[in-house]
Amino acid sequence: MKTIKTLVLLFVLLFPFSAFVTMANGQMLEGVVVDAKTNEPLPFSNVGVLNKDNGTVTNEDGRFNIDISKLSSNDTIRISYIGYEASDIWGSSLDSKNRIKIRLNPIDIQIPEVQISNRKTRTFVSGNTVKWDKLSFSFMSRQLGAELGTLIRVNHRVILEQIRFHVIKTSLDSIVLRVNVYDLVNGMPCHNLLNKPLVIRARNEVGDVVVDVSDYNIALDDDFVVCLEHFKELGNDKSGILISAGVFNNPSFSRLGSQGKWYKVRFNKIIVGIGLNVKMREIKK
């Protein structure tokens, strides 16, 4: 009888441990993202739980790993890449043994021709030009896909010429960031307006970073948000970049990972404006 009790106790003790090990081994969803037509990998695609703070970016081979241990059946994993139709996966369709291949279909984007008058047009700067070194901001998390951006207000059609920000401190080996431009829905960033990826490669020094984007033909009619995205691992876990910030500026936004929820940037409940600004040229209609 004592032997039976011992076996029962042993089973009770071991069963939860066995279940825990199974769960731990099944926490990560592995996959690869490819072009549906060519089967070529899509490097640096965004993969994340929609409106949650859990996301990542694929590597150079289009591969990714994402933690799904807290995924509910109602959650949605969204996979997206600029110039392609996004793909959604319901949490209820996944299991711990999934290794998936995501095929994204390219979008046939017709870029409208931008007519610039021969007459002299106005060039101006909009956004936050602050270079104050007493207040700075960085990405809110180390997750790939984390973003940081600032509202840019316009009241007529413009074409972007430069994207600019001021670096206060950096310990990165080099500054490699992706730029995204979003429209606003209910006061928050929503749809990416770019038709192809825009990557910044700048010197790893303190000071102004000015990126010429005039060749990208980015024409806009309404207010938008220009963002910097941490899309590629650089340096070690302690590496980072600090960008100047201030108060009483255009509001700024951040999110912790790909496809995540957007937040307004605040410091002690005060809205903070990240030092991001753009140089634009007015387009005559």
Image: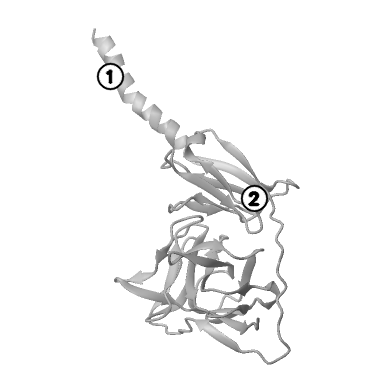
Does residue 15 appear left or right of residue 41 in this picture? left
Disc 1 residue type (three-letter) = Leu
Residue 97, disc: none
Rendered position, 254 above or below 94: below
Q: Specify the quadrant of the image occupied by residue 263.
A: bottom left
Q: Which residue is mark 2?
A: 62
Rendered position, 98 above or below 155: above
Closer-to-camera residue (190/201): 190
SS type, badge 2: loop
Does residue 61 appear left or right of residue 155 in this picture? right
Does residue 49 appear left or right of residue 36 in this picture? left
Residue 9, disc: 1
Residue 227 coordinates in the image, percent (x, y):
52, 69
Does residue 16 appear left or right of residue 226 in this picture? left
Res. 240 in view: no
Q: Which residue is depicted at the point 35% across and 74% down?
A: 271
Closer-to-camera residue (188/155): 155
